[in-house]
Image (tube, helix red, strand yellow):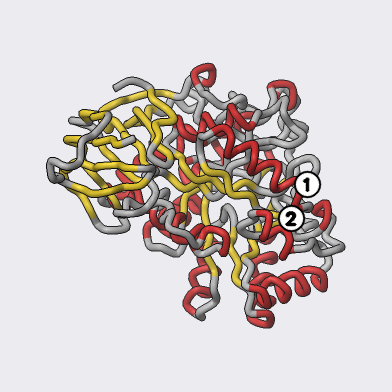
Amino acid sequence: MKTSIINARVLDPHSNTDCIQDVHIEQGHIKAFGKLQETFKADHVVDAKGLWLIPGLVDLSGRVMEPGHEHEGMLASELTAAVAGGVTSMVCPPDTDPVLDEPGLVEMLQFRAANLHLARLYPLGALTTALEGVKLTEMGALTQAGCVGFGQAEVPIKDTHVLTRALSYASTFGFSVWLHPKDAYLGNGVAASGALALRMGLSSVPSASETISLNTIFALMKSTGARVHLSRLSSALGVEMVREAKAQGLPITCDVSINSLHLTEVDMGYFDSRARLSPPLRGARDREALREGLAKGVIDALVSDHHPVSGDLKALPFAEAQPGATGLELLLSLALKWQQDMGLSVLDGLSVVTSRPGAILAHQAPVQSQLHPGTLTVGGAADFCLFDPQAHWQVIPQDLKSQGKHTPFDVDLTGMQLQGRVKATWVQGRCVYEREL
């Protein structure tokens, strides 16, 4: 099928494109930009006047909750939420039930995702069997099954010898390791250390939980040569340590969640479990350091940290409630809110959810193809979305496509108004989501 999107404002941070032009699609790929010869006869023409056409978003941290937690999020509902938010490529952690530590589980997940014809799903394999931190998984077999890297999700490896062997093995075969910097003993609280947690009587997580873990990771990277992606930085000290490590030439990339980028511990309100997150929300100084770090490229990408949680598990007292929040449908609007708050260009704002995470994903072995995630490239996959920059909206949980309805950006909690909304999303040249055009 041939499709032409006409009169759109085309924005692509990768090529520094910002202009009104047409985009033509044929057989799932971008054929050309601008005017074409009369030999190209589109079967379908979309007039996108007043809308932005941007690359499909690349989210490096989004849970689909399958297999094992279907009551919290179904694969179909979460991938529908992804495309409703303009996300066309999503990396999912391995902490499913059972854990993604066997090739058959990975192949089944990818088969089911592909048959839905929604967003592209890229699973991370477990670094250790059952995420127990004892025995390394068969990384080669998991890579063949489609894993783009290996991680422990929320479960830190206590035995440094095991982590050393894992990084050494990954380095030998060119695999990426994705780690959330969290100390196994200091990271078990429910709120950031400080006066507020003390006053509320909540167990706390100091910044040292992150920095101790980072020190260990950086030391082992130097000895093993491993390539590491750090997931969801949360502290000012962590940002400074990453800055110094990058200056030393360590092969590090990292991301921050929409929650840590926009909210602080004050947003917990009066023990509101919608703000029960991991990592916990920290102080204003940490938030400003994260925002500045993302703007200056110390932090490479912004992620939704999408983690749908059932109503029963959020209805518990704050300290007992399950951490997590829905975020896929908020990612683009919150990226642009950060861009406006920081006084950056629109292309800079879009880059943290398109080209910059796309470059990280494309560096993984199974993705070294002609997909060019997060970019608009002639010959590349036609993965993009149309976005209305003039639309204003507030987060009403019942309106979200995700099965998880809990978010700290709920209008009842923050009252935050967001600007801009995805109107339609294409994956491989096929319109997979349409709000209204």
Question: Residue at point 46% right, 41% down?
Answer: 88
- Amino acid at dot 2: Ala
> Would you say 23 lies left or right of 398 here?
left
Position of the N terminus by quadrant: top left
Q: Position of residue 222 (x, y in %)?
A: 63, 81
- Name the residue at the front extreme: 39
- Residue identifier under label 1: 99
Q: Earlier in the sequence, mark 2 or mark 1?
A: 1
The residue indicated by pointer 2 is: 126
In the image, is 98 to the left or to the right of 274? right
Residue occupying image coordinates x 51% and y 23%: 400
Q: Are marks 2 and 1 in contact (CB under 8 Å)?
A: yes
Q: State the count of labels.
A: 2
**Residue 42 pos. (x, y %):** 23, 34
Q: Position of residue 131 (x, y in %)?
A: 80, 53
- Secondary structure category for the residue under label 1: loop
Tell me what residue is drawn at x 29 percent, y 26 percent. 391
